[in-house]
Amino acid sequence: MLSIAFVGAGQVNFGGGEGPWNHAKRLEQLSAKIFKTQGTLVELKVVAIYDPFLAGAERALARQRSITQTPSLWKDTRIFTDYNEMFDAVYIDAVFIGVPPAAHGSTIAPSDIELQCAKRNIHMFIEKPISCHPVEEVQKVAAELDSTRLIVSVGYMFRYSQAVKKMKDIIAQYGEPRMFMARYNTAYSTLAKEMWWDVKSSGGPIVEQATHLCDLARFLVGEVDLESVTARSIKQTHRLGALSKLPANIEQLEEKLPEERRIPRVTSATWNFTNGCIGTLTHGVLLHQQKYETEIEVWGDGYRMVLTDPYNLCQLNVRLPNSEETVRVQLSEEDVYYEEDKAFLEAIVGQTNAIASSYDDSFKTYKFTWKIREQCELTK
């Protein structure tokens, strides 16, 4: 049996909000299938949920028990408002860490969740970003985790995408890219999470949100020359930083926040990869309603690939060498969140080690996003 706990009872772990994430849902699906490893059945049990807000955790558990197809999964689940108390009270094999960036990824309590798990030999699935604390602090966490034999997976789910794997195959076949371009325009008018609008709590939109595109840059092309990174932004205090459809609570929040903690409205970054390829990222907080606009474009000798809307109706259009035709690649339906959770649990039981994003590798993406943020803050 695998005893599992959730660190955080919010949208990432239990669904809701503007995205399709929901680790509890995927755990339900995996539990219904029951792992088999070397002929042995492996039962899954959720033994605990930690959240400092008791009522939210109680609602999340009640909802899961009301909709579950596998009642035994949640039958003995206990709720805690202190994660150290949970770790000491209940035997846990693995945790899903889905809390705000400021609440983890540090060596200092009460944000030292990863280190407390490591002390107790608990395997970890950690949602991105791995923190919003300074790089030097997060590096200490990375070093501690590297010294263990624990399974640690980070939630860069696009690494499990068929479309992204196809892009890697094309690069392997036709040669290194010369240009990587990523664009992410956020729909902000219904985005009322105060944490997200406060750089101190979230790390800012590049560290917290565009991190997925920065990670794909590294995954598809290779390592980034951090010294080459340049970036500029339109800050909230600029005339063009005024937004017409801000949620009322966010308007009130920004009036109280120091200027340096208000998020930029547009960010533009340029860099070189270590192989010489040029990369660009454009991120905006400009659209209304809920749907984001996201795409990645890669150019190489004779080829062009455009990946659009990877969060929802993922499409990949490709023009290959010696052709003038752009073809849409046929992709079967997939659930990248299911795939990343499955890879994590299978690695724990020793069935396979198909984890695509380790903590050490994710720390490289973290340094990249932090560098873009710093470059923006240096400019007027």
Image (cartoon, rainbow, N blue to C red):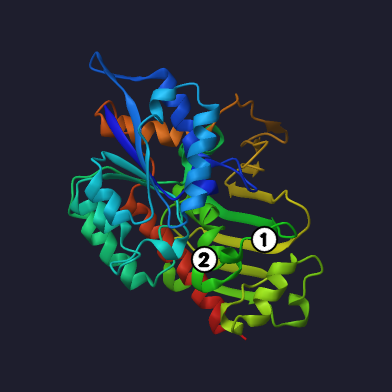
Give me the residue at 27% from left, 54% from top: 85
Side of 223 relative to 326 (left or right): left
Label 2: state its secondary structure: helix
- The amino acid at mark 2 is Ser
Kindly identify which numbered label has been placed on residue 192: 1
Give me the residue at 55% from left, 53% from top: 213
Residue 175 visible in image: no
Residue 116 lies, in percent from the top left, at: 25, 56
How many numbered discs sit on the rendered protein?
2
Residue lying at the far right of the rendered structure: 244
Q: Nearer the viewer, residue 194 or 328?
A: 194
- Looking at the picture, does residue 197 appear above or below residue 67? below
Which label's residue is closer to the chain start, 1 or 2? Answer: 1
Give me the residue at 63% from left, 81% from top: 256
Label 1: state its secondary structure: loop
Kindly identify which numbered label has been placed on residue 109: none
Residue 301 lies, in percent from the top left, at: 57, 46
Residue 210 lies, in percent from the top left, at: 56, 58
- Give residue 227's quadrant in the image: bottom left
Side of 55 relative to 303 (left or right): left
Task: Report the quarter where the C terminus lies.
Answer: bottom right
- Looking at the picture, does residue 57 appear above or below residue 170? below
Residue 99 lies, in percent from the top left, at: 45, 55
Kindly identify which numbered label has been placed on residue 202: 2
- The amino acid at mark 1 is Ala
Give me the residue at 26% from left, 66% from top: 140
Residue 376 visible in image: yes
Decide: few, some or many residues near mark 2? Use Cα within 10 Å; few <14, some 14-19, many ≥20: many
Side of 19 relative to 59 (left or right): right
